Image (cartoon, coloured by chain):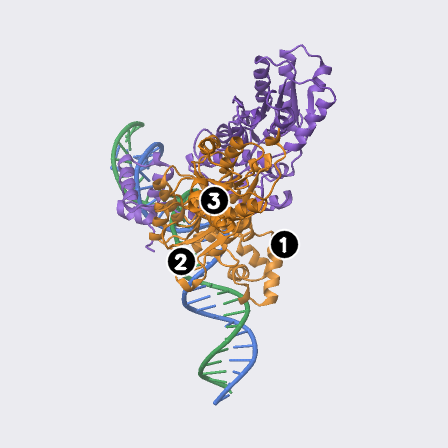
Chain colours: A purple, B orange, C blue, D green
Amino acid sequence: MANLPTVLDVGRVAGVSRQTVSNVLNSPDVVRPETRERVEAAIAQLGYRPHASARRLRTQKSSTLGIRLDPMTNGISGSVLDRFLHALTEQADRRGLRIMLFTATDPDDEIRQFTAMRDGADVDAFVLTSTFYGDPRTEWLIENAMPFVTFGRPWGIDDMNDPQHLWVDVDGSSGVAQATEHLLAEGAKRVAYLGWPSPSGTGDDRRRGWRQAMENGTSLTPTDLDALDIASDDGVSIGRDAIRRAITSGLAVDAVVCASDSLALGALLALGPDVPVIGYDNTPVAEAIGLSSVEQPLDEVASGALELLMGGSGSTLVDRTSVADGPRHRLVTPRLVVRHRTDLATR
Amino acid sequence: MANLPTVLDVGRVAGVSRQTVSNVLNSPDVVRPETRERVEAAIAQLGYRPHASARRLRTQKSSTLGIRLDPMTNGISGSVLDRFLHALTEQADRRGLRIMLFTATDPDDEIRQFTAMRDGADVDAFVLTSTFYGDPRTEWLIENAMPFVTFGRPWGIDDMNDPQHLWVDVDGSSGVAQATEHLLAEGAKRVAYLGWPSPSGTGDDRRRGWRQAMENGTSLTPTDLDALDIASDDGVSIGRDAIRRAITSGLAVDAVVCASDSLALGALLALGPDVPVIGYDNTPVAEAIGLSSVEQPLDEVASGALELLMGGSGSTLVDRTSVADGPRHRLVTPRLVVRHRTDLATR
DNA sequence: GGTGGGCATTTGATCGATCAAATAACACTT
DNA sequence: AAGTGTTATTTGATCGATCAAATGCCCACC
């Protein structure tokens, strides 16, 4: 294997020193234009690529983000995180960043991984998904002053206004409201909501969207709305059964908005082809069976996360310790994908 | 931020030199046991973690594998690669390896990424997915003597016996044969195959499994089998239409085995609840709607890939330039997941 | 004409680890 | 008692880059 060229080799060819080559790459503005061109020509000629590890050793930065990949995504909705990962990788690539994966068996193990990766200068920052209220990981990262951003709000009280950390999230409330309004516009009166039992940060947020849309768009009483608010854990058959129980006990339903595509599929099974149902996440399942669903703009989430960490462009971390250092969070708006369910449910 | 301990600090505490500490970590057998224990205690006491970048700079190895993540997986079956990625990350973690992601717009771009990552000592080897016949990537990697393993056979002639490179694959022929035999055992006589048009390495392999099982288990003539062999590109509606055309033109079908869950869903739509259908990949969709499907053992694929690269255990590459250096490929057997489709198709 | 300031570039030191060669410690011959 | 091996440990050099400080150069200014 032929020896790879180093800054020294490039410098020799261009007739300058190591450091000037380094400057051309890292602070081009301090190098005289004609020198810079000469160096750039030498770089191209030799096919020089900086040695990432050497650079990391010296700078203690890695241009790499760490993200945990769960051992196994649970069924139908797990694909959201995978799609986020794709989007994140793509957006990161655009900035010259890399994504490094790791797994962990439990939060403590994950924290061990954090230290190992940071100490080894493997990663500059972490991206966390599936955060929850009182998440020990975020607490630990804050205490140890490690940069990170989460996909998902911290659901603590008033963290919206003065968040402890950077986060990006999707406005689930808006998405479900859009879905509800769409159904109302199509003539439905009694739109039910099938979602996860409270308390659940994400779930309660989505429920709120439905409730507000119903309050604004119908004249149903709070009691009516309570009855139309159906709770079920996630899953196709468990969702189907929840709807069946509600119907059996006399509830009249024109349409259903759901907190996930799994639940939506369950609702479809329970209600048949004539009752419109809208899901959430726009998973491949929804696409395959022609189910309307709320699509999360994961590209925006990914680019938002990177902007919070790295600023408008570039691949080095931005200091956001002070409140004045810029925005500390971002809420993106999902959009409703309307489909015509001519297939499965009509036979 | 407190300065992280280095080998020198550990050595000071343990009363030994840098190099001895290094030896304890890398070649424990050359250190006297009592010294080793002393050093290990010091490591634990200081919470020392080796600096990955420094090690890489010196050794020119990274303990990291690179894998390309496609910008967007196409629909229903894309999840197979995602699940493989999860399995790979998990297995790699077990060996102290990391996975680094990257994207590429086209094969040339991907090759540029290969060089960049190798030159920067970012990765030791690559894992390739979705390889195809005459893939320029594999050719380039072979020419440039870069270590890699593919998930997927090279489908060239006779590469089975003397493969140019390391590969792991799933025996699709066996999986489809299992599915076919299952349907025959349940009483079906005329089992059709709905798969991708030839030539397609993966697709033809799966078709072969069906054909052999039918030849062994039925007395249908080659002409009958040709008629039951239905070709369609991947997709729900396109698969449904292909089946409908076949039925309309007078084909009698007892059951269908498909090359993917997408096609299987299409077959379900065309044939209704009474005709058994078996899919392939065991995607979340299959699980959600209660569709029998062939499950690929992605854990085995992942661990097989690592074994080929790294040997039985450990995290350094094994030299496999010579034929005598051990196995150069692995074929794992999938298994059929039988489900009862009581839901969607029965209403 | 000497002094000082700004700019472009170079030189010495360093990041944290491992490799290769040198040394120390100890047993075994002859 | 000197010589030869063997094993355990230490020291000097190095990987490829960047940081910090030094150098050289040109020009303006009093």
Chain letter for the residue marked with disc 1 in the picture: B
Binning the other alpha carbons within 10 Å of mark 1 as few (below 14), some (14 to 19) or many (20 upward) gives few
Q: Quadrant of residue A194?
A: top right
Cα separation between marks 2 and 1: 53 Å
Which quadrant is home to the N terminus of chain B?
top right
Residue at x-position 29% and y-position 40%:
A40
Q: Is residue B72 left or right of residue B286?
A: left
Q: Are marks 3 and 1 in contact (CB under 8 Å)?
A: no
Residue position for label 3: B100
Binning the other alpha carbons within 10 Å of mark 2 as few (below 14), some (14 to 19) or many (20 upward) gives few
Residue position for label 2: B161
Under tag 2, what secondary structure? Answer: loop
Disc on the earlier residue, 3 or 2: 3
User: Can I make out residue B123 in this image?
Assistant: no
Q: Which amino acid, mark 1?
A: Gln
Residue at x-position 41% and y-position 53%:
B147
Chain letter for the residue marked with disc 3 in the picture: B
Residue position for label 1: B45
Cα separation between marks 3 and 1: 31 Å
Q: Which amino acid, mark 2?
A: Asn
Under tag 3, what secondary structure? Answer: strand
